[in-house]
Amino acid sequence: MALLLGVDTGGTYTDAVLIRDETEVIASAKSLTTRDDLAIGVGGAVRAVLAQSGVAPEAVSMAALSTTLATNALVEGQGGRVALIYIGFAEADLDRHGLREALKGDPALVLAGGHTHAGSEAAPLDVAALEAFLRREGTGVTGFAVAGVFATRNPAHELEAARIIQEITGAPVTCSHQLSARLNGPKRAVTAVLNARLIGMIDRLIGRAQDKLHDLGIRAPMMVVRGDGALMSAEQARERPIETILSGPAASIVGARWLTGAQNALVSDIGGTTTDVALIRDGRPAIDPAGAQVGGFRTMVEAVAMRTTGLGGDSQVHMNASGLAGGVTLGPRRLVPVALIATEAPEQVHAALDSQLHASTVGEHDGRFVRAVPGGAVAGLGEREAALLARIGTDVQPLGQVLRTRIDQAALARLVDRGLVQMAGVTPSDASHVLGRLESWDREAAVKALTLFARRRAGSGNRLARDAEELARMIIDQLTEQTALTLLESAIAEEAEGFDLPAEQLARHVLLQKGLFGHRGLLALDASVNVDVVGLGASAPSYYPAVGERLRARMILPEHAGVANAIGAVVGRVSMRRTGTVTAPAEGKFRVHLESGPQDFMERDAALEALENALSEEARGAAEAAGADDIQVHVARDVKTAQLEAREVFVEATLTVEASGRPRVARG
């Protein structure tokens, strides 16, 4: 008998499940996610699931972790301070390809060097400039990204730069060629920057999670879910955290398939921070061929084709400033719900809310709170940010008491982006408490906070809502509407062929919207989502029946839907892919591009065989290192040729080798 432990750290809750022999859920539990130390929430959920099941910790055969941490960090613009070493490119490329935006003001060095399409050196690497930059800018950098022109054809300069960086700074380095074997250097650079930004955060999470499991007596190996739903070892995830973006959502798709047996369905998973929508087609999750897109950045990470929207139970509620009628919008930033923070600091929260309710005027920051996150990396903070962080302290404080000037608001935004400060305010979770749909936290605090929010004035001069209950219904209705639009956009994007307008515009088109309401006039318009929709997430039963009605679709809410991510974490397979290229730099010469550098052959088949052997060895080794058993290797060859004077000429070949198997487990 194999007992498998699955753990998922979401924005609000950490879930744990125990599955027997991959066939039966024998226990599930939830614990509040503790953002300042995620291992506390992991420990709470695991302790609860062990107690519920009566299973001894040493009987657990394997543990697997899925996490939304990387996804949420990119959506919310958080992470460590990074530096980019950009080899052989032009300075203008930083702006042209979105790298400045990805860097968020962090330093970059455009450095001479790089290689040609054929893998030969284009210019010598400027070592002196690199060393000077590291001594000038290296302090406080938590991770370096290195991207060289045509590094996938010859990674020598990336590897040399990485060696120098580690020698001088000791900081972790991400080389772009190690994340993707495809061309498109700027896109690889963005991916490397995001990986470097996440590396410290994910390393802390995995290390603390492993320590917590060990403290609880669980000695089983720990796996981590990748963005394509496959499993990797914890050590591999620490080196390549970018591959865990969409980890939680990918696990939910695997879990949804396991729970429902669905062959064709849209899966919508609502968490605290995001709503993730993906398609199951012919029993398998669809993979995004262009690479995962999260937080506005298109990466080169192979992942489930997922539409991730900053919309969840803990999304920030905004008053709609446009128009006279008012109304609300949600997201994309996550806030700590007032109902939740009131359970942690009841005296401070209720005293502030009561004082604000008794005030004769509506305050700009009424119903909002702030606190510092203990243990955050403060290196590289400006003077204003450091002063504001010291003023906030670790206690919960009303936001209006710590912001003294408008400039402080910009400093606060930067602290939130760095993950050093948490904000609390009105969210859909608070609205659900007001309406009695949730009873987990402090309903009275939620009522007070929504009462304050309802007093705000719309463009017409009227109150936004009469009372907390009316506002709560507005918020839940808006959540339904935004979720329905996200599902519509996903469905339309899958059927984009033949449509002239983008999915976002078509989803909002007046004819489609009228069709969803079954318009009858001179025209009869009918529209619906024509596949089942699987609703996942702890709050799905509260919100998703109305979404199904809005889309005129059958909504499936499976048992254990609230822990589908944790289930998906332990029913997946280990799968490692390696890709390489053979080019023809001259007639009769076939060049294999390897990690050790280019290698030339006189025969095409010999070159292909050498590349296949090298990739197979790498993929199998990575799968074994990840803990895979019964490994199977599959090779896909894409050989491009051209007709030249009535004969076929080799142009280029791309080989992809996949080694996969189930994780090894200790059987009791």
Image (cartoon, grey):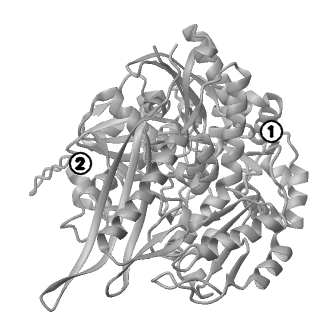
Instruction: From this view, report whether residue 497 is shown above or below residue 437.
Output: below
Residue under pointer 2: 516
Q: Residues within 10 Å of mark 1 (few under 14, many from 20)?
A: many
Instruction: From this view, report whether residue 521 is shown above or below residue 469.
Output: below
**Mark 1 element type:** helix
In this rendered view, identify the residue nearer to me: 270 or 347: 270
The answer, for residue 462, to whether it is visible in the render is no
Instruction: From this view, report whether residue 570 is shown above or below residue 484.
Output: above
In this rendered view, identify the residue nearer to me: 628 or 596: 596
Q: Residues within 10 Å of mark 2 (few under 14, many from 20)?
A: some
Of badges 1 and 2, the one in the foreground is: 2
* Residue at (34, 68) in percent of width and height: 606
Please provide percent x and percent y for residue 199: 67, 54
The answer, for residue 145, to whether it is visible in the render is yes
Please provide percent x and percent y for residue 655: 35, 63
Residue under pointer 1: 352
Q: Earlier in the sequence, mark 1 or mark 2?
A: 1
Please provide percent x and percent y for residue 11: 60, 40
Q: Is residue 539 left or right of residue 610?
A: right
